[in-house]
Image (tube, rainbow, N blue to C red):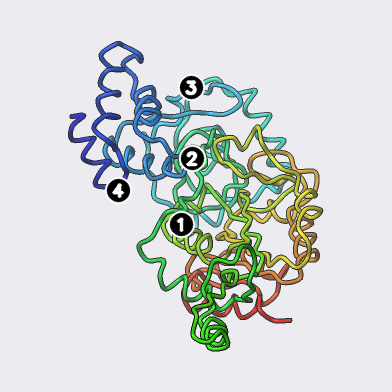
Amino acid sequence: MLIDFFYHLREHRLPVSVKEYLGLLEALKRGVIGPSLEEFYFLARVSLVKDETRFDKFDRAFAEYFKGLPSTEVLFRELPEEWFRDTLERAFSAEELARIEKLGWDKLMDEFRKRLEEQDAAHHGGSKWFGSGGTSPFGHGGAHPEGIRVGGPSKGGKSAVKVWEARAYRDYDDQVEIGTRNIKVALRRLRRFAREGAELELDLDDTIASTARNAGWLDLKLVPERHNAVKVLMLLDVGGTMDEHIARVEELFSAAKTEFKHLEFYYFHNCPYERVWKNNRRRLAERIETWDLLRRYNPDYKLIFVGDATMSPYEILQPGGSVEHHNPEAGAVWVQRLTQHFPRHVWINPESEGLWQYRQSVSLMQQLMPGRMFPLTLEGLTRAMRQLSRR
């Protein structure tokens, strides 16, 4: 089984060596971990993967190989897992869906706290308690126009106001090469070349002229290498609905790191707030104040947001609307501060442009930066780079 797992990782282009594989076998032989898939995951990752940028690739390969073995974590306190098992499948008619009323932000949060204190048993298919497959605004696998998803997978409506579960976001892989060539061509439209640094590149014209002046004696002339002098700041949405777009965003990220010598990047989730981070593994401990970004980077940086802008409208408009923490100021406030500080800015959206009209949050984000949201396509990137190049 482990030999097949080893070759499975190699098929996913992970540079796993035989020596590292034997180290994993030795650790298992010595009983370093117990009979737990979760413990094996961490042991295998630390034994086989030596570069943090490859963690995401490892995670996807691991999940594919061990598909079907569940692991559930819930944030803040333990809730009985059996409450949230998918034991009931219901089909909702248009009339049933029409009867589901929206609670509104304040009432939704008050009701969440109240029902959490009152409920003491599992419940499925209903309209009030935490459970699965019902019309209650609390639980998972059901239908409600806005609610708090707890303890299980989304049904796909993407309308949850908050998600009550632990999440592990992953850094985008900056070594992706397949499919990036055309993206690089599109990004090259944002160019302003300058010669900086040590003189390492041959200046052929000056060398010929100087040699001629020197009676034929070779006189080499060197100049600094030409680099794209454009400075770019990328803010990348990660986690949640962005998991569907990892491969395409990685291609964009990898191409950008190649094309832009002066590239800085940070992560956020859904909407920028008062803090961002550089490393998703340490995002809770090593956050960076967004105010520091505004002080650190001058307005001559080109700002590129990358995200699907798919979220609850509360996350943009409402203080406390973030799905992860209580944000003192609405996300719209921070988007406006960033776009005012960096006048040359665009938003790259990996979701199909045909779906934007069905996402209220996308419309809100477009209103915050009119005419500056572009799809993650070659044509969209070309238009985005043209927008950033304007004086």
| Image coords of residue 10 (percent x, y) | 25, 43
Considering only order in the chain, which callout, 4 or 2, is on the residue closer to the N terminus?
4
Inter-mark Cα distance, 2 to 1? 30 Å
Inter-mark Cα distance, 4 to 3? 39 Å
Query: For the residues carrying marks 4 and 3, which lies nearer the camera in this image?
Result: 4
The image quadrant that residue 57 belongs to is top left
Where does label 3 land, which residue? Answer: 80
| Image coords of residue 158 (percent x, y) | 52, 53
Where does label 2 land, which residue? Answer: 140
Q: Amino acid at mark 3?
A: Pro
What's the residue at 50%, 62% (across, down)? 258
Inter-mark Cα distance, 2 to 3? 14 Å
Contact between labelled residues 3 and 4, with CB atoms less than 8 Å apart: no
Q: Amino acid at mark 1?
A: Glu
| Image coords of residue 61 (percent x, y) | 32, 42
The kind of secondary structure element at disc 4 is loop
Where does label 1 land, which residue? Answer: 250
Determine whether 100 is above or below 391 in the image.
Answer: above
Considering only order in the chain, which callout, 4 or 1, is on the residue closer to the N terminus?
4
What's the residue at 66%, 60% (across, down)? 233
Determine whether 255 is above or below 136 in the image.
Answer: below
Inter-mark Cα distance, 1 to 4? 15 Å
The image quadrant that residue 347 belongs to is bottom right
Considering only order in the chain, which callout, 3 or 4, is on the residue closer to the N terminus?
4
Considering only order in the chain, which callout, 3 or 2, is on the residue closer to the N terminus?
3
| Image coords of residue 102 (percent x, y) | 64, 51
Q: Amino acid at mark 4?
A: Arg
Inter-mark Cα distance, 2 to 4? 35 Å
Q: Amino acid at mark 2?
A: His
Of 340 and 186, nearer the camera is 186
Instruction: Judge the density around disc 1: few (<14), some (14-19), many (≥20) Cα neighbours within 10 Å.
Output: some
- Which numbered disc covers residue 13? 4
